[in-house]
Amino acid sequence: MTAPKKLAEFILVALVCLMIGYGTGTVLTERAHMITPETTIALEWSDGIIDDPPMGAHIYLEPHMDGKSVRLIVHIGRGDPAFYQESHNGEIDVVADSKAAAAKWSVVRWTPEGLHLGRDGNKTRHFIPRASIKPIEP
């Protein structure tokens, strides 16, 4: 077996193709882990008057084997926020699709007592007392 006539060009083309493939794979992998506006159901900040620092409740969707996982993360502070989640991944519900998620979970309301999430008729679907909203320990 003989070596290609222009071995240097062959190696250069192979390295460029490898770098393009690696870069594309990295971008696509990171894109899958991003929370984008397309996945957001609701984002509501407290007014900052009854709490310091202000808190923001973000309800978003992640893929799930049974449809969509509805998740909640609470941002505590604005500049460099701490975060609160009720479970290890913040899941509060699993729904069939994004339309069902929006129907159930798009209402978010902050009160002096705590955080009200979703609506079921005239009732709140999920309530988190303000005293329970503590930053996740690293």
Image (spheres, rainbow, N blue to C red):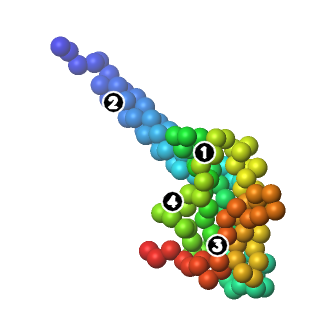
Depth check, mark 2 against mark 1: the one in front is 1
Label 1: few (<14), some (14–19) or many (≥20) C-alpha neighbours in 10 Å: many
Q: Give the residue at mark 3.
A: 128
Give, as a three-letter code, the residue at label 4: Asn
Sequence-first disc among 2 and 1: 2
**Do labels 2 and 1 touch, CB within 8 Å?**
no
Q: Secondary structure at mark 2?
A: helix
First along the sequence among labels 3 and 4: 4
Where does the C terminus fall, quadrant-wise? bottom left
- Dot 1 corresponds to which residue? 68
| Residue 4 numbered mark, or none | none
Which three-letter amino acid code belongs to the residue tagged 2? Ile
Q: Quadrant of the N terminus?
A: top left
Q: What is the three-letter code of the residue carrying label 1?
A: Lys
Q: Residue at x 43, y 40 (%)?
A: 22
Question: Rounded to the nearest whole Å, what is the CA distance between mark 4 and mark 2?
Answer: 44 Å
Name which of mark 4 and mark 1 comes first in the sequence.
Answer: 1
Q: Is residue 21 visible?
A: yes
The residue depicted at 35 percent of the width and 25 percent of the height is: 10
Mark nearer the viewer, 3 or 4: 3
Disc 3 crowd, CA 10 A, few/some/many (<14, 14-19, 20+): some
Name the mark nearer the viewer: 3 or 2: 3
Q: Tag 3, which secondary structure?
A: strand
**Mark 4 or mark 2, which has the lower sequence index?**
2
**Residue 39, percent from left and from top:** 66, 49
> N-terminal of the two: label 3 or label 1?
1
- Label 1: element kind: strand
Camera-nearest residue between 31 and 45: 45
Q: Is residue 55 above or below residue 87?
A: below
* Position of residue 46 in the picture relative to residue 93 (left or right): right
